[in-house]
């Protein structure tokens, strides 16, 4: 719904708008759905002027269809696949995070969601030399840990600092600030970035449930609308700027005590791929995790891969004590 | 900055009327006068004034910066190095936590009754006041007590031990000067105590915290002992409890980041029965587990007290032993200081989701 204002089209001036308002026509939709002949009679405006304005408004505001072949060409040229830095996770995600899509990580506290986000950010900023936007809602961002991960990839200090500079962190703590941040990114920063030098290839939101879960449920009627607005913004950013969006979500238990992802059914349709991270029970090293694919449009669901959180600090571990080295070598 | 009207922090009824009148983006509204807006949208005059006030505040640099300012990870690294952490006087725990309880994050301490949560909180409230030249933060502390377990005499014991410890350490003149000011009376007078009797008082206190913290910018630690107690008894609607707790957690994290303080929360334990086995898990539900940035679980193993770091964004999981003495929270006597790597290897079960209690019960 766009309000009729002076200047959105040549030929619309104040008297024009006032005359239309007296007939209760305030928006472009109202205007184009009216019959110009009747309108010319009621408002005492010239028929020619009305038809001309109508044509311009229709040209400006209608959506045009695109052929499937064009869409496919666009997809082939614009989509990129970003590796997560861990081969088992890449296998699970069909070689990595796809741009233009939303991927979701969910899991119990301490299951490694933030660590996976860190590793993806470090991989993209260091290997691929692209900028990463990281929206942190829980103050879980720890630059020290990023530095640790970078130190296992390269001993060169300058490279580490350069990679750290490519990761931009936004700290927001409630849903309205999150929406403001996303809308600002869409209208300003991303445009600048795609024109200028380093392009942005990934956006991470950790976590989206921390800001939304307190707004849903009970007698609050705004929660769903805000959830859908966040979903809409993330999807628009992913599609328009060819960015891979990674979000984290919490888990709750359903009636039978099984784990399920938070934020309910409506949110479950938003991400294209969903991965559930869990600790491995009875493991000798407490850093093993399993990743289960719970929703995917490319692979069979319920694929499970095991990976080690220490993968991203392996070399550092082996240098601490000789005992560790033997254990790493004996692992398959 | 193009903000859509549905995303503005206004009352839902006002937003519905604005959208029905055709306003889609904030820039449509920003040039209007209250009376004009009142007539076009059909809202009352006060609501119109409120809407325009909010839009104008939003355009101001401070608010805008909060939502759109980004730091690069490099800036964040420098900031983190400057922030520091609060020592616990148990060197094994300090190593496991990476220096101590971090400033700018929320830490949750869970444990069965009597294992030492309140002792650790009181120790932290004293330790935050250690002067900067001794390696501390030199800040004040706010202690929100919901259970009534705060004992001043115990804090006096701990404070005396800290002063004695610093006296032994003092080497140069700067340290000796700072030591003259560090007395038990000063430590007690820099500790603010609030007593909350139910969850409404607790929520109100957290809402009032930003004003309190602006008046007392030297506060570096906020302890809530415990956050579980007011929410566990007498709460019929569990989903409302989850919502309130999540909202509370986000407010606390916002305070921790904006005012550079450490927030420490204490939680209780509850039993979960699954597959015919019972396990001790932290209380307040599954989604509360996601609320705090770091989680420390204190538990018994026979007669030993152990602390496990269960969830942390930067530290590896570790279990260490500690003890409570007359002077407060300290290292366990016999155990030599374990390094974080070998403690993860040598700890008994290596698996932190199985609590030692379960072996006693099963």
Image (spheres, rainbow, N blue to C red):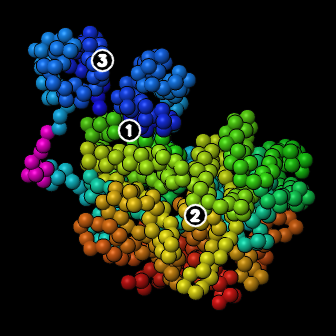
Crowding near the residue tagged with mark 2, few <14, some 14–19, many ≥20 C-alpha atoms within 10 Å: many
Stretch of the chain drawn in magenta: A64-73
Q: Tell me if residue A149 can be seen.
A: no
Q: Are marks 2 and 1 in contact (CB under 8 Å)?
A: no
Residue in the foreground of this view, choosing between A49 and A163: A49
Q: Nearer the viewer, residue A191 or A298?
A: A298
Q: From this viewpoint, which residue is outermost toward the bottom?
A: B362
Q: Quadrant of residue B225?
A: bottom right
How crowded pointer 3 is (Cα within 10 Å; few <14, some 14-19, many 20+) is rated as some
Secondary structure found at label 1: helix
N-terminal of the two: label 3 or label 1? 3
Percent from the top left, x then y, of residue B63?
Answer: 52, 32
Query: Between residues A303 and B31, which one lies in front from this camera angle?
Result: B31
Q: Main secondary structure of the magenta part?
A: helix
Judge left or right: residue B361 versus residue A195.
right
Q: Which residue matches tag 2?
A: B289
Residue beneath label 3, please?
A21
**Chain ID of residue with mark 2:** B
Determine the residue positioned at 77% across, 68% down: B116
Q: Chain of mark 3?
A: A
On the same chain: label 2 and label 1?
Answer: no
Provide the residue designation for mark 1.
Answer: A183
- Measured Cα–Cα span from mark 3 to mark 1: 31 Å
Can marks 3 and 2 be said to lie on one chain? no
């Amino acid at each position: 719904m766009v309000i009729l204002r002076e200047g959105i089209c040549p030929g619309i001036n104040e008297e024009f708008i006032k005359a239309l308002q007296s007939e209760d026509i305030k928006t472009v939709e109202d205007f184009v759905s009216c019959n110009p002949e009747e309108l010319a009679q009621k408002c005492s405006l010239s028929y020619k002027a009305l038809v001309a304005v109508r044509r311009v408004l229709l040209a400006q505001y209608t959506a045009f269809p695109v052929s499937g072949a064009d869409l496919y060409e666009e997809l082939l040229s614009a989509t990129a696949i970003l590796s997560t830095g861990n081969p088992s996770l890449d296998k699970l995600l069909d070689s990595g995070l796809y741009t233009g899509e939303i991927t979701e990580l969910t899991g119990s506290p301490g299951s490694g969601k933030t660590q996976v986000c860190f590793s993806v950010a470090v991989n993209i900023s260091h290997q691929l030399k692209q900028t990463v936007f990281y929206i942190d809602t829980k103050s879980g961002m720890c630059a020290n840990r990023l530095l640790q991960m970078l130190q296992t990839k390269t001993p060169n200090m300058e490279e580490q600092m350069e990679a750290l500079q490519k990761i931009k962190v936004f700290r927001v703590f409630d849903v309205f600030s999150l929406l403001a941040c996303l809308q600002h990114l869409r209208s300003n920063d991303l445009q600048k970035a795609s024109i200028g030098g380093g392009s942005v290839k990934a956006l991470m939101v950790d976590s989206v449930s921390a800001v939304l879960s307190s707004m849903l449920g009970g007698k609050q009627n705004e929660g769903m609308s805000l959830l859908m607005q966040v979903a809409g913004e993330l999807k628009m950013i992913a599609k328009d700027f060819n960015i891979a969006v990674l979000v984290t979500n919490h888990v709750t238990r359903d009636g039978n005590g099984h784990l399920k992802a938070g934020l309910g059914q409506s949110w479950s349709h938003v991400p294209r791929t969903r991965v559930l991270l869990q600790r491995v029970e009875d493991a000798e090293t407490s850093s093993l995790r399993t990743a289960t694919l719970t929703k995917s449009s490319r692979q069979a669901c319920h694929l499970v891969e095991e990976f080690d959180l220490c993968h991203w600090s392996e070399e550092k571990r082996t240098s601490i004590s000789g005992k560790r080295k033997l254990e790493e070598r004996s692992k398959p | 900055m193009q903000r859509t009207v549905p995303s503005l922090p206004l009352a839902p009824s006002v937003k519905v009327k604005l959208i029905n009148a055709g306003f889609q983006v904030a820039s449509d509204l920003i040039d209007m006068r209250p009376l004009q807006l009142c007539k076009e949208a059909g809202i009352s005059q006060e609501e119109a004034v409120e809407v325009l006030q909010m839009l104008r505040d939003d355009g101001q640099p401070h608010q805008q910066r909060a939502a759109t300012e980004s730091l690069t990870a490099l800036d964040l690294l420098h900031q983190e190095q400057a922030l520091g952490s609060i020592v616990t006087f148990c060197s094994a725990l300090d190593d496991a936590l990476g220096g101590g309880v971090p400033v700018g994050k929320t830490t949750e301490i869970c444990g069965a009754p009597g294992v030492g949560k309140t002792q650790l909180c009181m120790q932290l409230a004293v330790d935050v006041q250690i002067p900067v030249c001794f390696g501390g933060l030199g800040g004040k502390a706010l202690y929100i007590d919901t259970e009534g377990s705060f004992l001043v005499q115990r804090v006096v014991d701990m404070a005396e031990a800290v002063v004695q410890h610093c006296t032994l350490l003092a080497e140069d003149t700067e340290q000796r000067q700072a030591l003259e000011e560090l007395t038990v009376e000063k430590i007690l007078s820099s500790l603010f105590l609030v007593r909350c009797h139910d969850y409404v008082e607790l929520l109100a206190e957290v809402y009032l915290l930003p004003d309190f913290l602006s008046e007392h910018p030297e506060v570096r630690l906020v302890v809530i002992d415990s956050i579980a107690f007011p929410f566990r008894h007498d709460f019929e609607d569990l989903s409302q409890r989850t919502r309130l707790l999540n909202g509370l957690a986000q407010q606390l994290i916002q305070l921790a980041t904006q005012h550079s303080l450490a927030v420490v929360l204490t939680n209780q334990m509850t039993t979960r029965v699954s597959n015919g086995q019972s396990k001790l898990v932290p209380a307040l539900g599954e989604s509360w587990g996601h609320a705090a940035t770091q989680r420390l679980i204190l538990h018994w193993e026979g007669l030993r007290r152990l602390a496990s770091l269960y969830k942390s964004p930067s530290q590896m999981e570790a279990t260490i032993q500690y003890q409570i003495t007359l002077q407060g929270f300290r290292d366990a006597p016999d155990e030599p200081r374990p390094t974080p790597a070998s403690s993860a290897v040598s700890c008994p079960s290596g698996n932190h989701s199985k609590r030692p209690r379960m072996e006693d019960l099963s």
